Image (tube, helix red, strand yellow):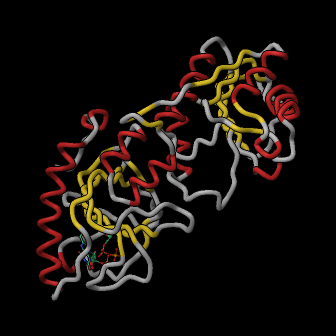
Amino acid sequence: MVITGELPNQTENTAVALGCFDGLHLGHMAVIDRALAAASDGLLACVFTFTKPGLEEELMPFSIMEGLLVQKGVGLLVRPKFESIRHMTPPEFVDRVLIESLHAKRVVCGYNYRFGRNAGGNASTLVRLCEERGIAASIIPPIEVDGAPVSSTRIRALVREGKMEEAARLLGRPFVIDFEVVRGQQLGRLMGTPTLNQSVPKGFVQPKFGVYASLARIEGGYWPAVTNFGVRPTVGAPAPLYETWIPHYEGDLYGEKVPVCLLSFMRPEQKFDSIDLLRTRIHLDGVEAGKIARRLKPALVLEEEKGQ
Ligand SMILES: Cc1cc2nc3c(=O)[nH]c(=O)nc-3n(C[C@H](O)[C@H](O)[C@H](O)COP(=O)(O)O)c2cc1C
Ligand SMILES: Nc1ncnc2c1ncn2[C@@H]1O[C@H](COP(=O)(O)OP(=O)(O)O)[C@@H](O)[C@H]1O
């Protein structure tokens, strides 16, 4: 997949999915799937979005998004800075971006898509402007779960409340982070529970503090694991941190971007009276999390299972 932050000046004819695509949830995937279906007629499948730092807390690391789009068969991802396109009127956007730059022959957007100066264009404006120019355009209606449209705002709220199973139903996959593994105080290995530490970048959504059943993806396999997200009231932490113990794994993961899926909230963080009590509790958490992970692990990852 080609990824660019500029408007391309040479591409094949494309089928373009338009949207914010900040979490690749079920609604986003419905738009992208329609563009991919249209692309099977010999067009290049393109996703067009934009970057606008500080708009909302991020829900998915870019590396995970990239992997999913490649897996789906998207050939071109265009994500210019919002500043570079915000001044365009809706007709200018269609002429300059969709036609001149992307050579769009099919265009797909979601029901609530807004575009052009001051968000002046909506999905019907897009369809009208495209059709006037001989381009087929379609609008994907809202995808609903539990009677309400799936949205990134709704998923962020679920993550903040620790409702990971519900978040996964809206995302179509578990909530996942893959931040770089950093060094900690090296206490974990002394307790028999080495934990890979991952700090949260600024501007990224933070789940409720506590212990979660999780899966760690290492070298293509999913390992049942247990993750604490929080500030470790017993030993202290300067900032919220993901700490993941993978009971049946041994190896050095410092400096790597290890994907960790949070499956289910198990308990809040506690301040223990001694490191011994904390150690006993973490071992019990590991056993409990293993049971939950095996129960909840999505069917698609079963055959890749390693570890226990
Ligand atoms: C499953 C699990 C549960 C944890 N629960 C707590 C907790 O309730 N309270 C707490 O203060 N720290 C908790 N921790 C964090 C530990 O204090 C921390 O992982 C340990 O001190 C090792 O730190 P290090 O990675 O800096 O060596 C937990 C860690 C894990 C992996
Ligand atoms: N089973 C395991 N689960 C998690 N990390 C492991 C495991 N085995 C080895 N490691 C490695 O050990 C490191 C964690 O050891 P730990 O003593 O907790 O040190 P730190 O405080 O630096 O995180 C991880 O970053 C990883 O590189």
Tell me which residue sits at (58%, 41%) in the image.
Answer: 21
Judge by depth and name the residue closer to the eye, 137 or 96. 137
Q: Residue at x 55, y 26 (%)?
A: 141
Q: Quadrant of the N terminus?
A: top right
* Residue 18, percent from left and from top: 67, 33
Q: Nearer the viewer, residue 276 or 220?
A: 276
Q: Is residue 134 left or right of 271 when viewed as pictured? A: right
Q: Is residue 110 left or right of residue 285?
A: right
Relative depth, front residue between 302 and 175: 175
- Say above or below: 35 vs 196: above
| Residue with the most extreme bottom position | 273
Question: Compared to 132, does 155 lie above or below?
Answer: below
Q: Is residue 62 left or right of residue 99?
A: left
Residue visible at 40% across and 71% down in the picture: 241
Q: Quadrant of residue 46?
A: top right
Residue 95 in the image: above or below residue 278: above
Residue 158 percent across, percent down from the top left: 39, 53
Direction front: furthest residue: 147
Q: Residue at x 36, y 36 (%)?
A: 146
Residue 125 picture location, percent across and down = 76, 27
Quarter of the rendered structure image containing ligand 2: bottom left
User: How many marks overall?
Assistant: 0
Q: Nearer the viewer, residue 19 or 89?
A: 89
x, y percent for residue 39? 63, 18
